Image: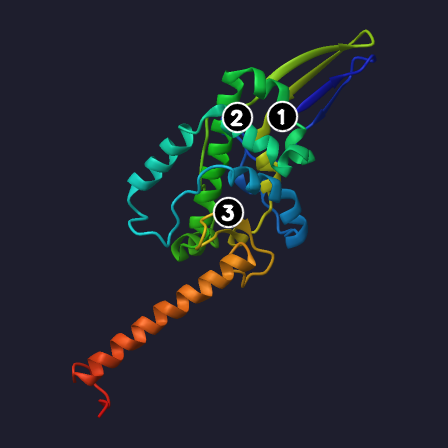
Amino acid sequence: MITRKTPSGKGQKRSPSKQIVSQDRTQSVTEAIDDRIELPRKAQQRLGPWIELANLLPPPPSRDQPRFLDPEPLDRWRAHCRAVPLDEFVHRFERSRLAQALGITDTLDLQLLREDSDHARRFLDLVGEIAAALHTLVNAATNPEVLKAVDKAPLRIRRLYETPAASRSEIWIFKGTVTTRWVDPFKDFLAALEGVEVVRLRQCPICSRFFYALRKDQKACSKRCNAARRERDWRANQSSYEYQRKLKSAGLLEGRTEK
């Protein structure tokens, strides 16, 4: 939230999201839900930079990988993310087009990231929490039991009692007037996430990067990954067909055997 104190003494506040503050237990979750669904292209443009930001980290394990339900792969992924050198991660961010994305740079101070290792660490933690939130939503959207449950009542997916890092407060003086600013990038991420169709949040089965599906039949993040996915599926089906044919030839399955 940004607060600007004007000479008249009246503050102007802008709240970036209707998302529930976890400490406020008086607000009903249904108050933040309406039946308006945003057009996929508009939602993708709003959320896209945050997805790209999460993709700067090593990709988390996907459902296609073995032992997905085992928590150990996720714990190893989080440890891997925390071990990324801070200078390298900040440099990776600066080289990406995200450094010019208004939705991201509005609340990030690149100079502060370069000069303050503590702030850089909080920034890395912030991106890790964004990636973890996307990972949770992606896998919730592919779980039929979860989708069935949320049709009946709101289902809480995640709760945080402390905002992830990179938030800060600032006090400025400009032309004799005090200006204050509270910066919280995670709230901006939540604002971008608000109202997004959860089934459009996906993880590429080839490269494991997050992406937003503009088409509901889009199964991979790019044409290259989609071609690799088709080839993989074809090979998997081909192996299954050959296996079934051999079983039939050996008389181990019902049906006509080959002569």
Which residue is most to the top?
176
Which residue occupies the foreground of this view, 205 or 239?
239
The residue tagged with tag 2: helix, strand or loop?
A: helix
Residue shown at 42%/49% (left/top)? 139
Residue shown at 35%/67% (left/top)? 236
Q: Residues within 10 Å of mark 3 (few under 14, many from 20)?
A: many
Tell me the quadrant of the picture where the C terminus can be found. Answer: bottom left
Label 2 and label 1: CA atoms lie apart by 9 Å
Q: Residues within 10 Å of mark 2 (few under 14, many from 20)?
A: many
Question: Cβ–Cβ below 8 Å for labels 2 and 3?
Answer: no
Identify the mark nearer the N-term, 2 or 3. Answer: 2
The residue tagged with tag 1: helix, strand or loop?
A: loop
Disc number for residue 123? 2
Which residue occupies the foreground of this view, 59 or 15?
59
Image location (x, y in percent) of residue 116 = 55, 15
Question: Cβ–Cβ below 8 Å for labels 3 and 1?
Answer: no
Image location (x, y in percent) of residue 189 = 58, 35
Q: Amino acid at mark 2?
A: Phe
Q: Is residue 88 left or right of residue 259?
A: right
Q: Which residue is mark 1?
A: 108
